Structures are given as C-alpha cells and as structure tokens.
Amino acid sequence: MTALGFLYPGHSAEDDYPRMEQMLGSDIRLQVVHTDIGEDAHRVDALLEMGSPKRLAAGVEELRLSGAEAVVWACTSASFVFGWEGAHDQVRALARAAGLPASSTSFAFAHAVREVGATRVAIAATYPEDVAGHFAAFLNAAGTEVVSTRGSGIITAAEVGTWGWEEVKAMALAGDHPDAEAVLLPDTALHTAAHVRALEKELGKPVLTANQVTVWEALRLATRRVNAPTLGALFTKEPLVQVKG
C-alpha cells in the first residue's frame, strides 16, 4: 500500500481524488486534508495568504498520522503566485513541517510537461487574466515556452467547482493554440478527473489538469509509476517496441 497525502484548499473538486483513486486501480490510497482558505478569491493578495506556511502547516499532522509517504499542496494559484523562488521556499517549509517529501501543483505541472515530452504549451485557465499570467511566468521560469494564455475571469473556487463537462471542454478548446504541444488547465477547484481522456480526444494532444498532475506528482515523489490510461497521456506508459533485425 502506498499512501499519498494532499493538502487541499477548502471544498470544491476534492471528489476528484476518490475518483482518481479508483481509476488508478492499484494499492494506492489518496488521503485529502482540507486547509482553511481564508477568502475565496483568485486575487494575488488572497492567494498569498491562502498558501502561507501557517495555513499549510495546520493540516500536516493529520497527514502524518495517515501514514502518507509524500505530501503535495494541491493548489496551483496559491503556489505559483509566490514566484519560482517563493514556490520553492513554500515547498521546503512544507517538507520540514511534514518530515516528508513535498511538492505543489505548480511544480507538478512543470514536471508533467516534461514527462509528456512537451516544450510549448497553452494555458486555459479559470482565473482572471492577471493571475493566469503569473502561471505563465512560473512555467517560463521552469523552462517551458507558453505560446498562449487565456483566462476566464472566474474569481471564486466555489464557482469553478460547479463547472461540468461542457464548460470544461469549451474552456480547453478556446485556450488551445496550434503551436502548443499540450494544453494545461490549472485549477484544483475544477472537476477534470472524469474528462481528461475525452479532452485529449477533442484536442488531439496531451491535456494536463491540476488534480491529475497533483496525483501524478505525489506518485513521483513516492517513486511509484502507475499505468492508468483513463487519466490521459501523463498516466499512459507506452510498451517497449522491439525492432527485429
């Protein structure tokens, strides 16, 4: 049994995690602990407070007691708003508090982009444009070229959590770009676990979504690789092809 821990801000799309646990179909347990988000707003000052060390540290003990082998701060916006260096500081503080390997959804995206072999990406975000721009800057710092960024102007996670397939598909299609090798949907408040494969079929390229990459990152920290094609290209390990001479 591999137990993985997630600090999830508030309540929006946390049901993606038990759904993904079923999709993984393995001896993997996804333990979600909710953090107090303070003000529910995709606004830089509110996001900096949401991701502050004291708010993250408050949930750490429960995760430790759950037997988690790694912990991920399951929030994109309240990690990338700290900038490349600040996001590293955030994760280091979380690792110290938990005594476990730690990461965040923002770093999960940076690592997942490389995993699917993409160098140029498009961002299709729920956030206002200025917040989406911070994510683009974070990815640029990670060495990824962002060819387009599209925000949707949604202020609260509560509203994002009500979106269904049609809204998610429309946002992804509107945010795609012909030069992008992958499309990124960065918001853990957005329900996407059930939609990744359908989105990839619509767009014809890998789609990386916040809750999907967050789980993949926790598995990476725990040195586990799982083949789960229902979760898209990121979770699909191609079989080795033997060339006959």
Image (cartoon, rainbow, N blue to C red):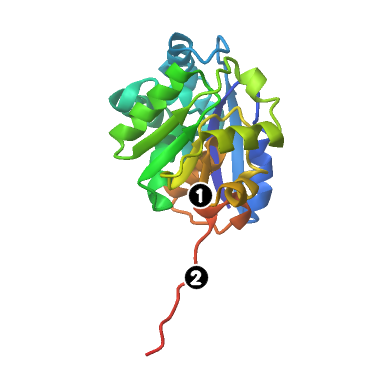
Q: Earlier in the sequence, mark 1 or mark 2?
A: 1
Give coordinates of residue 83: x percent, y percent: 33, 23
Q: Amino acid at mark 2?
A: Pro
Give coordinates of residue 3: x percent, y percent: 56, 45
**Looking at the image, residue 11 lies above or below residue 235:** above
Q: How many marks?
A: 2
The numbered disc on residue 239 is: 2
**Looking at the image, residue 34 lies above or below residue 1:** above
Residue 67 visible in the current orientation: no
Q: Amino acid at mark 1?
A: Pro
The residue carrying pointer 2 sits among few (fewer than 14), some (14 to 19) or many (20 or more) residues within 10 Å by Cα, namely: few
**Looking at the image, residue 102 lies above or below residue 223:** above
Alpha carbon separation for disc pair 1 and 2: 18 Å
| Rendered-image quadrant of the C terminus | bottom left
Q: Residue furthest bottom?
A: 245
The residue carrying pointer 1 sits among few (fewer than 14), some (14 to 19) or many (20 or more) residues within 10 Å by Cα, namely: many
- Look at 57% across and 38% down and name the residue there: 173
Q: Residue 96 occupies which quadrant of the picture?
A: top left
Say left or right for 60 vs 27: left
Dots 1, 2 in contact, CB < 8 A: no
Q: Depth check: 126 or 219 in front? A: 126
Residue 216 visible in the current orientation: yes
- Look at 58% across and 52% down and name the residue there: 1
Q: Depth check: 7 or 139 in front? A: 139
Say left or right for 220 vs 2: left
The residue at which mark 1 appears reads as 206
Q: Depth check: 161 or 69 in front? A: 161
